[in-house]
Image (cartoon, grey):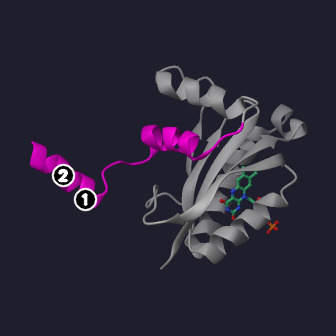
Amino acid sequence: MDLYRICYRARIDRTWLNGSLETELDQALGRIRRTNRVAGVTGALFLGRTHVMQLLEGGTGPVLETLYHIMQDQRLEDMEAVCHEPVAERSFPASLMFFRDLRGIHFLGAAEDLCALLDRNERLDRAHLQAFLDVFAPSLSAGHATRQMMLV
Ligand SMILES: Cc1cc2nc3c(=O)[nH]c(=O)nc-3n(C[C@H](O)[C@H](O)[C@H](O)COP(=O)(O)O)c2cc1C
């Protein structure tokens, strides 16, 4: 199957930000993961103080369709593309939607920087996405694991 990935950043609608974001997102994630399972979509969702960034990966059709639904979502505004391109493999093959709330994470220095990056008023691109993947994506793909074992 041809694999495609789309990453976007969006501002969280202020009324949602001030209100029930945590509980609602908790409930929404269950629904999102069920929908993504059916669509064969995996990825990751990062929550900052004012913005979210989401990576969607899967077949081109299902990924675009999922994005289309999200674009209609009133809880998000000012959506901007970070990158969209064919990929050889998924970064989150086992996650119907990996989730990290990056607000107030202090145990992981890098995550604090990434949280600031997410909210900063500066265009994000593929290199920024890669910085997130370097910290959060499971790195032990089969080939990677074999190479690691050979080093031991
Ligand atoms: C930050 C955020 C991320 C979302 N991610 C997904 C997703 O990965 N897959 C999905 O099916 N819906 C996702 N949704 C939900 C959709 O935006 C939408 O609410 C859902 O598809 C229901 O759409 P419908 O009411 O048109 O059926 C997300 C919503 C938000 C706010």
Looking at the picture, how far across and down is residue 75, in whole percent? Answer: 84, 48
Where's the C terminus, which quadrant?
Answer: top left
Q: Mark 2 points at which residue?
A: 147
Q: Are marks 2 and 1 in contact (CB under 8 Å)?
A: yes
Element under label 2?
helix
The residue shown at (43%, 64%) is 89
- Res. 6 in view: no
Looking at the picture, how far across and down is residue 23, in whole percent? Answer: 72, 42
Q: Is residue 60 above or below residue 74?
A: below
- Ligand 1 falls in which quarter? bottom right
Q: Give the range drawn in magenta.
A: 123-152
Label 2 vs label 1: CA separation? 6 Å
The residue shown at (66%, 45%) is 53
Q: Name the residue under label 1.
A: 143
Element under label 1?
helix
- Res. 51 in view: yes
Q: Is residue 151 magenta?
A: yes
